[in-house]
Image (cartoon, helix red, strand yellow):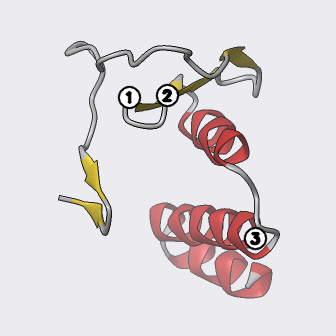
Amino acid sequence: MRELAGRLAALDPDAGEAVRVIAYFDRLTAERAGLEALVRGAAVLAGSAARLADPVHGVRIRGEPDGRRVDGPARTPVPPTTDWPGVPLGPGGAR
């Protein structure tokens, strides 16, 4: 995968970066990483804070671009704020 990403980056840097991102999350999935690792990884790769808020399960995770987690699981449901981009998720994934 690294060799493919390197070759692709030489032809199209954006496509090469996309392949590296896919490989990163594939590796996390293969290692059965938890939600915190996925959110922190998204924040690091995006260079911006990332958040997962699941009021049904009382989960609230925010990761900073430096990889730090800045808040823990919520004890009470917290509705998502409108100032964060987001996608509602259902049992089968994004709606």
Of the residues shown, which amino acid type is indicated by label 2?
Gly
In the image: residue 94, left or right of residue 67: left
Quarter residue 1 falls in: bottom right
In the image: residue 76, left or right of residue 79: right
- What is the crowding at mark 1: few (fewer than 14 residues within 10 Å), some, or many (at least 20)? some
Q: Earlier in the sequence, mark 3 or mark 1?
A: 3
In the image: residue 86, left or right of residue 5: left
Number of marks: 3
Of the residues shown, which amino acid type is indicated by label 3?
Arg
Mark 1 and mark 2: span between their CA atoms?
5 Å
Horizontal and vertical percent for residue 40?
A: 67, 36
In the image, what residue occupies the spot 49% across and 28% down?
58
Q: Which residue is mark 1?
A: 55
Is 48 rendered above or below residue 41?
Answer: above
Secondary structure at numbered mark 2 = loop
Horizontal and vertical percent for residue 34?
A: 72, 51
Is 76 rendered above or below residue 10?
Answer: above
Secondary structure at numbered mark 1 = loop
In the image, what residue occupies the spot 62% across and 42% down?
45
Query: Residues at badges 1 and 2 in contact (C-beta under 8 Å)?
Result: yes
Is 82 rendered above or below residue 60?
Answer: above
In the image: residue 18, left or right of residue 5: left
Furthest residue in direction right, as rendered: 31
Labelled disc at residue 27: 3
In the image, what residue occupies the spot 25% across and 43% down?
87
Q: Which residue is mark 2?
A: 58
Mark 2 and mark 3: span between their CA atoms?
27 Å
Q: Earlier in the sequence, mark 2 or mark 3?
A: 3
Horizontal and vertical percent for residue 57?
A: 47, 37
Quarter residue 56 falls in: top left
